[in-house]
Amino acid sequence: MLFPGQEIDGERSPKTVIGIDAIREATRRVSLNPYEGSFNVVIIDGAEAMSEDASNAFLKTLEEPPPHSLFILLTANEDAVLPTVGSRCQSMGLAPLSKDAMVEILINERQTTPDQAEQLFRLSRGCLGWAINALDDDQVLEQRQADLEKMQETLSAGLETRFTYANEIATLFGNDRDAAKALLALWLRWWRDLLLIKEGADEFLHNSDYAEFLRSQASTLSTAEIVLFINRVMQTLSNLDSNVSPRLAMEVLMLNRPIEAGQV
């Protein structure tokens, strides 16, 4: 939850639950006069993570908000938000920018080349904020490259190396749930690209800057193997959301990695 220049409920628990105390604190602080500007603005990122008690405590405030206050609830799963909370909100779908719109903005306002703008569109999946952050912070793309290289190194390595990395991801999940899930989402997009290549749809690649490497890897795998591993990564994400042991979930995934031609 964010206020202008402030953050409360700073670190979520490993289970990513927004509790009643955080909601009560937000309600208390939004009742004060705005420190800057005309409104107090509260952003709840991941509104589906509010506990039932927190959601119920929020109802009266949503129904009769204090003057000069604005609540923004963000969620990628509207159905997971308590219905009594959702019914007191105005739903607004936020679609990603089109390719043409983002490329034009990046070229005209950030002076990128057309190729760079198109690549950022693919990597950001239409999220302008992500693209701008990647331009301003070199570590964003450097971390992506490091994560992809680590994935390739690990999946082609022996069991000990794979289990070591499984433990690293499990530890990351305990410290930063969203970061660990983002890492697995990166894996998913890579394997989706392999599937696109097998189906002759190279023009839709997410990781188009790795096109040649992807083609080489795809040639060593069958379509069935790729689809099976995609499903296993998705199942791992589902298991993590269901509070299965992160280490166990990742070790099972590592055990079931596909065997490329020439590997043992």
Image (cartoon, rainbow, N blue to C red):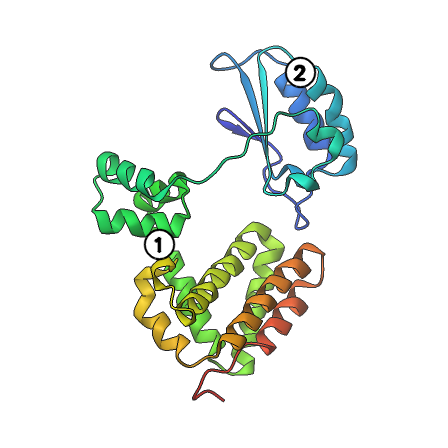
x, y percentage for residue 20?
74, 33
The reply to whether discs 2 and 1 touch (Cβ–Cβ < 8 Å) is no
| Above-or-below relation of 36 to 241 | above
| Above-or-below relation of 43 to 222 | above
- Left or right: 48 in relation to 202: right
The amino acid beneath tag 2 is Pro
| Above-or-below relation of 92 to 104 | above
In which quadrant will I find the N terminus? top right
x, y percentage for residue 221?
46, 79
Q: From mark 2 to mark 1, how far is it between C-alphas?
A: 41 Å
* Tag 2 residue: 65
| Above-or-below relation of 139 to 29 | below
Q: Residue at x 32, y 66 (%)?
A: 211
Total numbered badges shown on the rendered structure = 2
Q: Residue at x 27, y 38 (%)?
A: 104
Residue nearer the viewer, 250 or 215: 215
The amino acid beneath tag 1 is Leu
